[in-house]
Amino acid sequence: MIRRGSGHDGAMKVTHTATYEAPLAEVYAMLTDPGFRRYAADATGVLSADVTVEPAGGGHVVTIDQVQPTEGVPAFAKKFAGETTRAVQVETWTSQDRATLTVQTPGRPTDVSGDYVLTEQGGTTTQTFTGEVKVKVPLIKDRLEKLMAQLFSEGRDKEQAAGAAWLRGQR
């Protein structure tokens, strides 16, 4: 779900829900597995991805530094995106069920930030993201934020599909 919210500086609010047919501990293990993160990056169509996962306190810090193609991006945004764009995604898991997420695009006027929460019910785990997209270009802020939110949600959908396949044993 994407909606203009009352976030910082009028940023666009974004929520996304992914459901996995697996217990929370198994989903957390998958989300903090570098092998899965490379598999999911390939599934989302990135050109390259450097993945690091480091233990931190009661959780892990997952960093994915990736280069994405910008084909299909509308002309108004292509000026800012170029042929490819770099995104640095950092998930800081403070426990098996909570993380903060930041996605920064070095040299570009956009970023995404928010929180992930994992909840389990009856052996099924739901991953909920609540956050915002910010664009620092006033003239096209609304259109670019909407586009970024849409691309972020589409990426999460592809990651969910990759996660479902991974949990079924597809590697």
Image (tube, grey):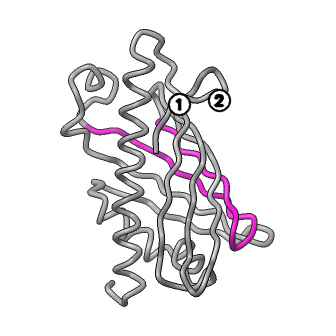
Find residue 95 and report its horizontal and vertical position in percent.
74, 70
Q: Farthest residue in the right direction?
A: 57
Residue shown at the point (42%, 84%) measured from the top left:
167
Q: Farthest residue in the top direction?
A: 139
Q: What residue type is labelled 1?
A: Met
Q: For residue 57, which quarter of the picture? A: bottom right
Find residue 151 and report its horizontal and vertical position in percent.
36, 43
Find residue 13 and report its horizontal and vertical position in percent.
55, 36
What range of the chain is rendered magenta?
84-105
Residue shown at the point (57%, 73%) measured from the top left:
32
Tell me whether the residue at label 2 lies in contact with that at label 1, contact meaning CB atoms closer than 8 angstroms: yes
User: In the drawing, does residue 47 fall left or right of residue 6?
Assistant: left
Q: For residue 150, which quarter of the picture? A: top left
| Residue with the mark numbered 2 | 7
Neighbor class of circle 1 (other Cα within 10 Å; few <14, some 14-19, many 20+) is many
Neighbor class of circle 2 (other Cα within 10 Å; few <14, some 14-19, many 20+) is few
Say whether residue 7 is magenta. no
Sequence order check: which comes first, mark 2 or mark 1? 2
Give the SS element for disc 2: loop
| Residue with the mark numbered 1 | 12
Residue shown at the point (48%, 71%) measured from the top left:
19
Is the stretch drawn in magenta largely helix, strand or loop? strand
